Image (spheres, rainbow, N blue to C red):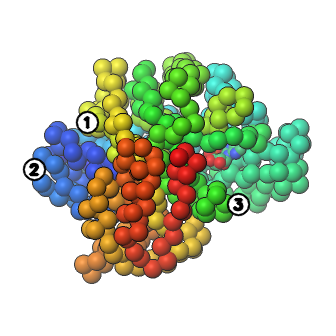
Amino acid sequence: MKILVIGSGGREHALVWKLAQSPHVTQMGCAPGNAGIARERVARNGRAVECINLGAEDLPGLLAFAQEKKIDFTVVGPDNPLALGIVDLFQQHGLKIWGVNRKAAQFESSKVFSQQFMAKYGIPTAAAGTFDEPAAAKKFAATLGGRCVVKADGLALGKGVLLCQSQREAETAVEEIMVGRAFGTAGARVVIQEFLEGTETSLHALCDGTTARLFPTSQDHKRALDGDRGLNTGGMGACSPTPFLTDLQLAGVARQILDPFLRGCAAEGIDFRGLLYPGIMLTRDGPKVLEFNARFGDPETQVYLTRLENDLVELLDASAGGTLARHELKWKPEASVCVVMASHGYPGRYAKGKIITGLDSASQLPGTKVFHAGTAWQEGRIVTQGGRVLGVTALGRDLRAAQAAAYAAVEAIHFEGAHFRRDIAAKAV
Ligand code: AMP
Ligand code: GLY
């Protein structure tokens, strides 16, 4: 099989790495990929993975490439091409592709859509309202005493969420998003949720339209600095499993969230074939959904795929083809920890082009895999090219061992201004 992966981050490197191990794969490309992806090889024949100079949102370019190269199966990493309808486009042209279609992508591309869906189908979530008019939004915030979260409806690069502690902050947030359009047209409508307290955790479930297969627990670390301080980022590290939910509780969560989700999709005519990633808060009143994403998490993917035993080509093929009920997910008993090494200044402004050293010695440490996120080749060397640069990932017999192994590998890698959190997985340990 010839496989094309779309995207360029740490998630896509993990997808490429895992897919390339499948005996079904003979050739693999990634658009646009990164320096680490370009070093991967197809296990069956040793062929190098080819990075293709096409952006993840260049739908016509990607379609033409897949047709010309006779790609058998395309796997989509990021949310934007899904929201733009890449799956619908490829399918219209008779090409096999994995990811949610445009209608199903609304769970991520519209927070108003998700919130109304959750209310309609009884999925546990925060008390919330959806608004297209600032005065009504402010009035609702007042009913929560101003302790609320104001969310721009549309995709805003993970930034359109403002946490408020007072009515004054809530009114400023509504003004910024709805009137000042701080996140562009994404802010034409907002969701306002009550401010929930608890432990945040990520769920992932692979779906094929009728069946959902839940992954083990994982946790992202969204803030830039140790102790969950600093600005929100795309994610500074992850671990799996986490001790915050027992297997029994996880099964309960599946019933409370996944069952009504699938029932609602059937009722609304949404054919959800892809990855459902609910962000949830474990509150004193039970788990509540904060948001839905419709793709793999980054860096959750890095910890999940290092633990996954199954052939990922077979699983994604079953997800796209509606035959997931025939597959059980199998996970290594080991724990996995991923520490993100970022550029100095991230998530704000940062410099690029810093030379990275120690990648090979880090990769030789047992149980370690260094996934690249923002890297490029420059004059024969690997240099930094993005905010999140590397996802240094390690397996260990338990979380503590995995954490120690991941940090040992981090210590072996150097680039000017490298910034990483020192407390990834600390809460879970
Ligand atoms: P979202 O993109 O909706 O997941 O929001 C981004 C981040 O904001 C989440 O990861 C949470 O840390 C925080 N957040 C979102 N909604 C709430 C809420 N209702 N209560 C408390 N924190 C929230
Ligand atoms: N782990 C955060 C995200 O993928 O959105």
Query: Identity of the amino acid at label 2?
Result: Asn
Q: Residues within 10 Å of mark 1 (few under 14, many from 20)?
A: some
Three-letter residue code for mark 1: Asp
The residue wearing badge 1 is 311
Q: Quadrant location of residue 356?
A: bottom left
Q: Residue at x 41, y 76 (%)?
A: 415
Q: CA distance from mark 1 to mark 2?
A: 17 Å
Q: Nearer the viewer, residue 65 or 237?
A: 237
Residue in front for this viewpoint, 114 or 40: 40
For the point 83% across and 51% down, which residue is it? 165
Which residue position is annotated with label 2? 45
Mark 2 lies on a secondary structure that is: loop
Across and down, in percent, residue 54 comes to 33, 60
Sequence-earlier tag: 2 or 3: 2
In the rendered view, tell whether residue 45 sits above or below residue 192. below
Check whether the beta carbons of the residues at disc 1 and disc 2 lie within 8 A of each other.
no
Please tell me how crowded label 3 is: few (under 14), some (14-19), or many (20+) other residues with Cα within 10 Å.
Answer: some
Q: Residue furthest left?
A: 45
**Residue hosting label 3:** 182
Q: Position of residue 42 (x, y in %)?
A: 17, 51
Q: Amino acid at mark 3?
A: Ala
Give the Cα separation between the discs numbered 2 and 3. 50 Å
Q: Is residue 133 left or right of residue 400?
A: right
Which residue is nearer to you in this view: 137 or 234? 234
Residue beneath the point at 73% across and 40% down: 196
> Ligand 2: does it lie within 8 Å of the C-beta at label 2?
no
